[in-house]
Amino acid sequence: MQTAALYIGLMSGTSLDGVDAVLADFSGSKWAVAQHLSAPFAPELRAELFALNTPGDNELHRAALAANALARTYAQVVQALLAQSGIPASAIAALGAHGQTVRHRPQAFDGIGYTLQLNNPALLAELTGITVVADFRSRDVAAGGQGAPLVPAFHQHVFAQPGRTVLVLNVGGISNLSILAADGSVLGFDCGPGNALMDFWCQQHTGQPFDRDGAWAATGRVVPTLLARLLSEPFLHQPAPKSTGRDLFNPGWLTGHLADFANATPQDIQATLTELTASACAASINCYAKESKTLAVCGGGAFNRYLMARLQALLPGVAVTATDAHGLPAQQVEAAAFAWLAYQALHGATASLPSVTGASGARILGAIYPA
């Protein structure tokens, strides 16, 4: 099996804002990101992916066509990334393509549950001429795990510091925390909502897809009684391992909690939703890693200045910075993780951590679709 040094990682997360792609070079003693590119989703694809997060008519047909459209989008991003780098597709060992999560219910219903990512990796391999590694979560779920978060093993590979506890917080649509302990052990789990609810509320009331810099939230005031109600969500108080998604933190969940707060202004709701994300993350840190003094933030949330300020205020003894200060730009981390996961798969190496997902053991993750 081909094991060349260049890999591509693709990530389209629960924020549904588009695709991040990185070209990673694993040839040296320390791997590096050689190129990065971001591309937004076409509005109609974004709308359909968002709709498919909840039950609807003709789901199977719509999901299959959305998966095809997603694969075509991925292929266009890969081709643009290769053009930007001047590297031919034949030089790429593999690309890791996570797909778009539309259901995540591990351990539910029958004890195993399921996780579902829309993707067509076979079509992606045909369109790009590159070996594709996909379906990263399901093996861990089959082994009794949560199948998520997947990134703590990569965070350990990149950010761990011997003798020092480092925290890595990814704030995408959902927020997840990696605790890279001083003794080399790793714990990771989903904290709760990240940008998903904030983006929904901002889109609904301003027409903008997200609250740039958190500037709109900063004009509002937190509604304490609403915040308390949102923070009473049982998931937020469950012990790790745990994972979640739009199955729980979605517009319907929010609307149900807002029924008694019709007099609150939209910007006050936005401020409260931002505080919800910050508070859930801070509570997770205080519960599991209060001794840490370092928090590196990645994902779209790292660009929300107001959210970053609220995290710092809630964690006064912790240095809160973007992962840029730790050697990898915040917008590149998750895509780089999937390049690394593809590398692990092609080398027959495990990439899951039972301490994170609760699975019965570490597993090689991903299904391989040869070029």
Image (cartoon, rainbow, N blue to C red):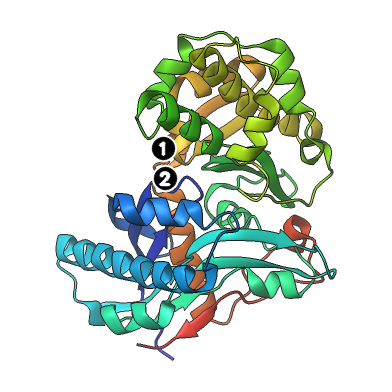
Of residues 311 and 158, the one nearer the viewer is 311
Q: Residue furthest bottom?
A: 1
Of residues 182 and 167, the one nearer the viewer is 167
> Alpha-carbon distance for marks 1 and 2?
5 Å
Of residues 102 and 252, the one nearer the viewer is 252
Give the vertical position of 361 relative to 52 (above or below).
below
Give the vertical position of 13 relative to 250 (above or below).
below
Of residues 369 and 218, the one nearer the viewer is 218
Q: Quadrant of the C terminus?
A: bottom left
Q: Position of residue 251 (x, y in %)?
A: 58, 38
Q: Quadrant of the N terminus?
A: bottom left
Quarter residue 68 falls in: bottom left
Q: Is disc 1 placed on a helix, strand or loop?
A: helix
Give the vertical position of 157 relative to 25 (above or below).
above
Residue at the disc numbered 2:
328
Q: Is disc 2 placed on a helix, strand or loop?
A: loop
307 relative position to 253: left or right: left
Instruction: Note whether residue 352 is visible.
Output: yes
Figure disc tally: 2
